[in-house]
Amino acid sequence: MNIQWYPGHMTKTRRMMQENISLVDVVIELLDARIPYSSKNPDIDELAKNKYRIVVMNKCDLADEKSTAIWTKYFEEKGFKVVLVNAIKGTGISEVTNAAKELMKEKIEKQKARGRIFVPIRSMIAGIPNVGKSTFINKYVGKTTAKTGDKPGVTRGKQWIRIKKDFELLDTPGILWPKFEDKEVGLKLAFTGAINDDILDIQTMGVEFINLMMSVDADCIRKRYNIEFDSIDEPHEILAKIGEKRGFKIRGGEVDLERTAKILMDEFRGGKLGKITLELPEDIKNMNERKAEEEKAKKEADYKRKQEFKKK
């Protein structure tokens, strides 16, 4: 299952971000704490390379706490300020302002020393679709300012929002990048709801999710659905066991695998399987090594084809 999703409005969003990046001092990027690497848009690193950076790991209440601590250290070592947030409850949101002021402290003091009395902080907030950005902003402001929804792609235009007298926020629509170089990145984005379910095969997605959970934490599946299976069992067989246990049947007595997969994904996204992080920094190394091997194999195959063509 190779997933790619880049609607036309995302090209427009990227262009808008490029045009407005010069207006801000700080770029705040919301990540999904369950998939910090896969939910981090590489295009934003390029767009914001000369700006102060804050990484906000949202949905930390749904992620494994030990894994979140590992990711926090990882991003801090790369020079990011890191804030852990539960946007629905509002936990940690006030720390974003403090982080921005700390980053801007020296610049603000210099400008005040030159006689500028009021120095506002202007920031841009960015993130992938359905990462909880609008919910975050509404809690931040304390009233409903940004549109929210449970489907990716609700926010469609930019808007300036005054958080405090000296703090302004430029909201931008959720944006992905044109091509996921690694298949696993696309899958993890789909699992967490960053990609529109309407374009996906939900049954295949459920099987792929179980396949990943076999290496992440298979016991979460066992405990939630009260089923038994071995590590050698096929993921589609485990999906069928879940459906059987829940009594999801279609005409003829067969298990309704599509309904089962939908429930599985809904319950993962809602935290009913437990606190789960689907990746760790060490996985990045493995993905990069796999990518390098694939590129090497492709170059070797291309070279072989060229040599065979010359012989003809």
Image (cartoon, rainbow, N blue to C red):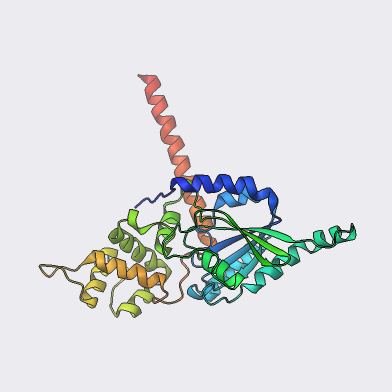
Task: Please give left or right for residue 39 compared with residue 221 in the image.
Answer: right
Residue 205 location, quadrant? bottom left
Quadrant location of the C terminus in the rendered image: top left
What residue is drawn where x is 57% and y is 54%? 158
Work out whether residue 288 or residue 11 is closer to the camera in this orientation and state it: 11
Q: Position of residue 182 (x, y in %)?
A: 45, 51
Q: Position of residue 108 (x, y in %)?
A: 81, 61
Q: Position of residue 134 (x, y in %)?
A: 52, 64
Work out whether residue 185 or residue 137 is closer to the camera in this orientation and state it: 137
What residue is drawn where x is 48% and y is 74%? 62
What residue is drawn where x is 33% and y is 70%? 264
Would residue 273 be seen by someone viewing this image from the given angle?
A: yes
Q: Looking at the image, how many numbered discs can be counted on the residues?
A: 0
Work out whether residue 179 or residue 87 is closer to the camera in this orientation and state it: 87
Q: Position of residue 297 (x, y in %)?
A: 44, 40
What residue is drawn where x is 52% and y is 45%? 12
Would residue 84 be seen by someone viewing this image from the given angle?
A: no
Q: Compared to 272, does 13 lie above or below? A: above
Task: Please give left or right for residue 142 compared with residue 264 in the image.
Answer: right
Q: Compared to 221, does 156 lie above or below? A: above
